[in-house]
Image (cartoon, helix red, strand yellow):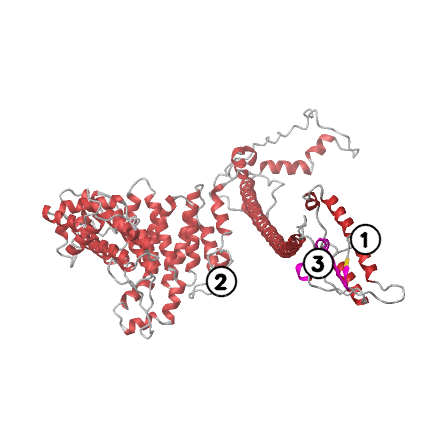
Amino acid sequence: MDDDEFDFSDADLDDLPANTLDQLETRAFRATQQQVQIQGHEAVVDEEDFSYFGFDDGDEDEVVNLDDTRGASHFADHAGNHGVTGPHNEYRAAQAAPQGNGRSVQYDGAMEVDQAPQQSQVDVGRLLERIKKLEQEKRRLNLNLQTASAEVIKKTGEVDNLRRRTEHATRQAEQRLAQQEQEHRDSAGKIAAERDALLRQLEQAKTNSAFDEHNRHEEQMRRPRRAVPARPKPQAPALASPAGTPKKGQKNLPLGDGFDDDDVIMASPSRRREKSKAATPKQANKRKRQVTNDSPVQILELSEPRDKARAPDPPSFTETKLNIALLRNLWKDDRRFNLLHRLLSHHCSIGDDRILEALTQYSFPSDPQKKLSSLVYDGLSTSVPSTIARELAINISHIFVNIWNRCLNEKYYAPLYLILDALQFVLACEPAATAIAVMEEVIPLIVESIKLVAIPVYEARNRNEKKTAYLLSSQYQTIVDEIDVQTCLELLYQIATCCVSSPSTEPLTLFWRNMPLDFVLLTLLKEQHIPDVLLMLRVLSTSTLPTSLGPIISADSDTQKGGESNLISRLTNLFSETLAPISDPKSPSPIAIPEAQIWRLRLKVLDVLTQFSIPEYGSTVLVTHALCIGRLIKYLNHAVSALYSRPLSPTQDLKIETVNKTMKLLNHLTASNPGFNIKSKLNETLGGLHAYYVSLTRLAFSEGLVLEAGIEQEVMDMAHDILDDGLSPEEGDALAEVFPSGNSV
């Protein structure tokens, strides 16, 4: 048995009555003094004495043979197993032991209990049961502790793994950031070094130019001044008489040759040379050559014929006053060449080369020895210098425009992307006036370049086999690759926005006067590339003028209105046409345009028409057009029906936006033209009247929930107002009965 089996707690002992120990001692004493009556060979034992030590009822009929050694040992073992110790147990064992002569006394009687067993104060069974429960609870808690410890260890390991991963990711991010910062610093250092080198070259060029100018000026100053008369020389002294008194400064030293000094003077050869020199006629304009200028050229000039007319010499260098303030301007920061510096360092859109570096890779087929970059340098060197920075930008633009024009003439389109990059960069860096100054030269080049790509599409739209085969040929694909239509249209839009920003309408009028109508209609065909059509719509949105829409064809009003009518028809056709590029007839499945792209394109058409409707002239043109209102109504009905055909589709927001914009445009046209009746314009549109009732009724009685969520309350009110103006009272009552829960007013 486990030592802890009867390990009672202090609380269990405290619950025992105070006289329990006295009772136990009394019973133990009585047990040792119990009279055993032997009747025959049987011993009767009071059961009360043994019940205290744990003997149960099952042992009351047990007969113990005290004469048998095994019986005595059994009694002792039985008492020991029940925890019986003390004098009583020892007495029983002595009685069971053999006597004197080795004969054993046997007691064949059954032990009988004289009194009824008394209930013990301590319930051992309950204590054992409680101990077992506590041990089970202890094992359960130990198991839970082990499980929790394992879980903690697992979580700790996961946390450590996450921490290590986080630290590793942080280190990698810091390394990448440090590397990027280092690359940025290196790039910035390279750019700064290149800029400093260019600035030094510019300063050196300025200094060399100043010194060259100074040297030319000094050289001009050193040239012989033929028109300046020679300095008058003192006349030769008159011949003195031999008898005369010699001058004070003359020294008459005796020669010691036996002749008089005066006679010697008269006969002196030097005097004869002086006399003959004085008698020789002088050249009026001849003077001595300066020592500082002994050039042979000047000697030849001195030997020119005397009768040749000579121009007057410039004033001497010492007589010219230098303008110090003008010379100091050479050291000032001149911003005229900032554009040129930036252009020299600007990279092209394809590759990593700079624009001028990339131009060295191309040359015209007619002159393969000369690179296109040389044409740029030649144009810059021959341009007239100017003090206005904008004129330099215009000169650079003219240089690239001339190269572009020559590329079109020679059908050499490979370097066009570099020309477009350069022009876009120049116009983006300069004020809008620069774009306005060059647009008359640039617009025709843009139009001709785009037509090379767009006209074959127009010719093949009727599925002509020959024309379609050309679209699929390598020749056409090369043209498409070399002429970037989107970049051309972006440059066109850049010029148009510069014209819009002008305070006057003259630049914008000039822009649309140079824009051909057939080119605009060509780029708006449903077979054209969708991004190209979107860009053309953006350009077209700038064409709203007080007296015209779109390209200005002629001063004749009828001709202009005819062109505007064709333009509006082309735009509104995009609401119902199936937009699809021309594909290979042999292809099993044609090219499909994403639905979202179609909705966006038609939203852009609505934006253009809304821009047209802002001025009074444009609003009148849209209202009087034969098909514009009917097509808008049918497109509104199409957009409203699309809300229910594919519930909560990815294009649901685009459909809601289309409904709102179309309804606002119709309401604006109605409000800005008093007396205008929409129903009167629906007779020429097939199904227009039906679309009018269905679409406006759905909007007027819409609750803006679920499928109609996003439709503005203002739009619902607009539809209700238009219905009120166009319906009779009977028709209004019938619609109210059909939609009793609508938001009627």
Judge by depth and name the residue closer to the eye, 348 or 289: 348
Image position of 188 (left or right of 504): right
Disc 2 residue type?
Gln
Disc 3 residue type?
Glu
Is the residue under label 3 in contact with that under label 1 (CB below 8 Å)?
Answer: no
The mark closer to the camera, 2 or 1, is 1
Which SS class for mark 1? helix
Badge 2 local density, few (<14 within 10 Å), some, or many (20+)?
A: few
Q: Mark 1 points at which residue?
A: 87
Residue 477 in view (yes/no): yes
Q: Name the residue under label 3.
A: 112
Residue 268 within the magenta-colored segment of the rendering:
no
Q: Disc 2 and disc 1: Cα gap in Å?
A: 127 Å
Region rendered in magenta: 38-58
Image position of 384 (left or right of 513): right
Disc 1 residue type?
Pro
Residue 384 lies, in percent from the top left, at 43, 47
Residue 471 is drawn in which quadrant? bottom left
Q: Quadrant of the N terminus?
A: bottom right
